[in-house]
Image (cartoon, helix red, strand yellow):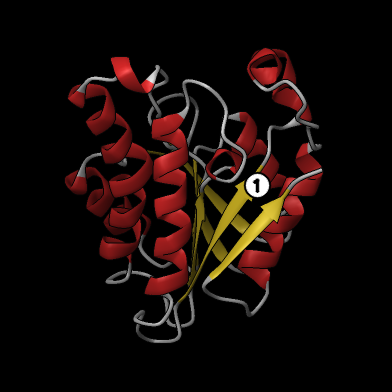
Amino acid sequence: MKTVILIGALGKMGQAALSGLGKHKVITAGRSGNVDHIVDITSEESIRNLYKDVGHFDAVVNTVGVCEYAEFTEMTEAQWMSTVMSKMMGQINLVRIGQEYIADNGSFTLISGILNVKPIPYAIADATTSGAIDTFAKVVAYELPRGIRINSINPTVLTEAWDVYGEMMPGFEPVPSKLVGKAFERSVDGFITGQVLFVDA
């Protein structure tokens, strides 16, 4: 049994990840709500405090990253930076800081999303930062010390979230959260590293 920090545990993607982590001790974290620890991934201090407070852990699974949606011609620098600091730098910092605290042979699992390979209107910031996270996971895997692994999960829209996002994604086929949970399970329990695990219909 591993000790896994699950960030974003209360969201639909967090619940999907949780379905694949049933045999582990899961420590929940998020910006608010009924979680074990409060964390803001846009704050280096908050991330470091999370790791210090938890103590020993074998894996970090992140399912959050705030993204701004607008037409490219209307996107402000502030909107771009909001997305970059959460979806991209927030996740990079989870790894950059977390490498100091995670157990030997531990693992990081990050979240990207299908829009970097199947774009839709208004989602350029989401698509761009998702592409960055997929690339980061592929490349940083060569540099992580102590046998630490890293992968990114790149899912399409969840069946459980279709009522919220379906109108934005015509022609997309949603997938059940249990299937996405299997990708998280493979990342945490397998031996792969530097991989992008696509979950698409």
The answer to whether one can see residue 169 in this image is: yes
Task: Single out the residue that lies furthest toward the front.
Answer: 73
* Residue 145, x across and y down, in percent: 35, 84
Q: Residue at x 78, y 32 (%)?
A: 174
Picture layout, residue 6 above or below residue 118 = below
Measuring from the top left, give residue 79's x and y in whole percent.
Answer: 27, 23
Q: Residue at x 38, y 86 (%)?
A: 146
Question: Whole-percent x and y of residue 89?
Answer: 28, 48
- Going by the picture, which residue comes out furthest to the bottom? 146
What residue is rendered at 28% in x and 55% in y?
A: 93
Q: Tell me the kind of residue under disc 1.
A: Ala
Quadrant assignment, res 46? top left
The N terminus sits in image quarter: bottom right
**Image height check: is 104 above or below 121?**
below
Residue 65 screen position, x and y as percent:
42, 37
Is 7 left, or right, of 19 in this rendering?
left
Relative to residue 84, is residue 25 depicted above or below? below
Disc 1 marks which residue? Answer: 17
